[in-house]
Amino acid sequence: MPSNLGHQGVPYTPARELQFAYGKWVSDKVEQGYQPFFMSFMFHPLAFSLKAKKIDHMHADIERIYSRIITRFSRRPNAPQERYKLPLMLVAPDLPAPKHTKVDIKDVALNDGLHCHAIFLQPPESRFQEEFHLWATENNAALIRDTRVRRIWVGRVFATPDHMTQYALKAVGTRLSSDSLLLLPRERNGGRDATARGYDEACRREGGSSLIRTGWKPF
């Protein structure tokens, strides 16, 4: 195999390697009993010209939504001993692909088409006993209250969670910065930078090297 080819003969690029690494991480979690869901977040107009600034505010609103979700999974979501009950959520910003014509014109016009996808992993053990995609749809209005999120779409992933993860990350590292990923829950007692430690588990290559940083203990 030529040295410039990566997984499954696909030409190697750092962005593709990132997608494959996260895809494997999600697949590993599913094998451990996590249930995967795909989420899309569309936003009201954001009054910022820079994409990075818009993404920061999108992340902030998604974190607010996540904080509302996790109270259904644990009565004490901030307690260290309850951390295993919390869902995992990998958030990636995205832009409309030019080849896709079946796109709501309003979604393309707002924020230059910038939106977010997420892979939501429901843990095998928690107090949550409902179908997450049905519950999230039913409680959409309550989840997005006081945020700039216009709507959330949630669907169950029944097959190829690695491919769905790669799709969610398709703009990261190419049209959008690789620093624009968000992994929840954040590292305890850390700021935004500390969250990057969480990327290590997702991006760890065979042999123990990391695409981003090293030294982070898995969940």
Image: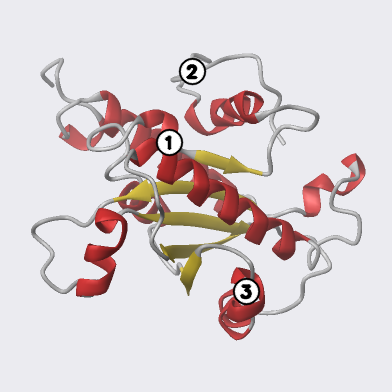
Inspect the image, locate mark 2, and give the three-letter code of the amino acid beneath it.
Ser
Q: Nearer the viewer, mark 3 or mark 1?
A: 1
Real-space CA distance between mark 3 and mark 1, rounded to the nearest whole angstrom = 26 Å
- Do labels 3 and 1 touch, CB within 8 Å? no
Please name the residue shown 42% across and 63% down the image: 43
Q: Position of residue 65 (x, y in %)?
A: 64, 61
Which SS class for mark 2?
loop
Q: Residue furthest bottom?
A: 138
Q: Position of residue 154 (x, y in %)?
A: 49, 72
Residue bearing mark 2: 210
Q: Foreground: 201 or 96?
A: 96
Q: Quadrant of the C terminus?
A: top right
Mark earlier in primary sequence (2, 1): 1
**Which label is found at residue 132?**
3
Inspect the image, locate mark 1, and give the three-letter code of the amino acid beneath it.
Ser
Mark earlier in primary sequence (2, 3): 3
Q: Is residue 45 above or below residue 60?
A: below
- Quadrant in which residue 42 is drawn: bottom left
Real-space CA distance between mark 2 and mark 3, rounded to the nearest whole angstrom = 32 Å
Inspect the image, locate mark 3, and give the three-letter code of the amino acid beneath it.
Phe
Which SS class for mark 1?
helix
Please name the residue shown 60% across and 76% down the image: 136
Residue bearing mark 1: 180
- Do labels 2 and 1 touch, CB within 8 Å? no
